[in-house]
Amino acid sequence: MLGGLWNLAAFVIALSILVAIHEFGHFWVARRCGVRVHRFSIGFGKVLYKRIDRFGTEFVIAAIPLGGYVKMLDGRVESVADDEQQYAFDKKSVWQRISIVAAGPLANFLLAIIVFAMMYMIGVNSSKPIINDTIVDSPVSIVKSATPFQVIAINDQKINDWEELNLALVAQIGENAFNITVQPVNSDNSLTASEPSQTFVVSLQNWAFDAKKKVDNLKFRIYSLFS
């Protein structure tokens, strides 16, 4: 129950951020083009918070966080006085109107670039490919190492996490054999300095690969500190 509420809250927060960035793109370009903005709203329905800036724009947070909108002065939906015509959206040039409409999706696109760049700079958490043991008469039963051990390479490809190990094993489909390099780990999952790595040749002559199982096809028992 608590997990479901947490997932719902995370979804609402993520969606609200996306909406805010999207609508801010429309808002910012509209202001740059001289369009008068009546309201900048995150969400729909009952207003929970409202602030009015010196230009008369209402900044609103509403009760239903499933979208948002930027309401601009527009002669097609309201009467516009002659001296206000210059601030109306529909009176701007075609390129200005295109820029305002395209600014929202472009803002989300730029956000995605920034987020992915930060992920690559900061890094993301991943699990080390640590094996508890192997199953007798399986392709990897040839691996004779103190357990638990970490897979550190497949052939000459360094392996850092389970995703890389899965991809490396998929690449062996159709091969007769591959080299696997392993090294025992300590109780804190660090590599054991006192024992060197070892390389074994794993025969794939009788390997029946199942794409849905990947690592499990080779009959590794995955290691867990809590098992």
Image (cartoon, rainbow, N blue to C red):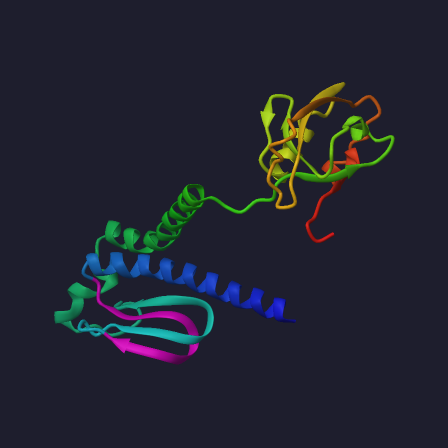
In the rendered image, the vertical position of residue 66 relative to residue 152, given as above or below: below
Q: Residue at left 73%, top 22%?
A: 200
Residue located farthest toward the right when viewing the structure as drawn:
137
Q: Residue at left 76%, top 28%?
A: 143
Numbered-mark total: 0
Q: Residue at left 39%, top 52%?
A: 108
Give the residues in magenta: 35-52
Q: Nearer the viewer, residue 201 or 195?
A: 195
* Image location (x, y in percent) of residue 84: 16, 70
Q: Residue at left 71%, top 21%?
A: 178
Residue 224 as seen in the image, left or right of residue 113: right
Residue 135 as seen in the image, left or right of residue 92: right
In the rendered image, the vertical position of residue 196 relative to residue 116, given as above or below: above
Residue located farthest toward the left when viewing the structure as drawn:
83
- Residue 175 seen in this snapshot: no
Quadrant of the rendered structure where residue 56 is?
bottom left
* Image location (x, y in percent) of residue 107: 35, 52
Query: In the rendered structure, does residue 149 fall within the stretch colored magenta?
Result: no
Query: In the rendered structure, does residue 49 fall within the stretch colored magenta?
Result: yes
Task: Give the position of the N terminus as an image quadrant.
Answer: bottom right
Quadrant of the rendered structure where residue 33 is?
bottom left
Q: Nearer the viewer, residue 79 or 101?
A: 101
- Residue 12 seen in this snapshot: yes
Quadrant of the rendered structure where residue 185 is?
top right
Residue 115 as seen in the image, left or right of residue 31: right
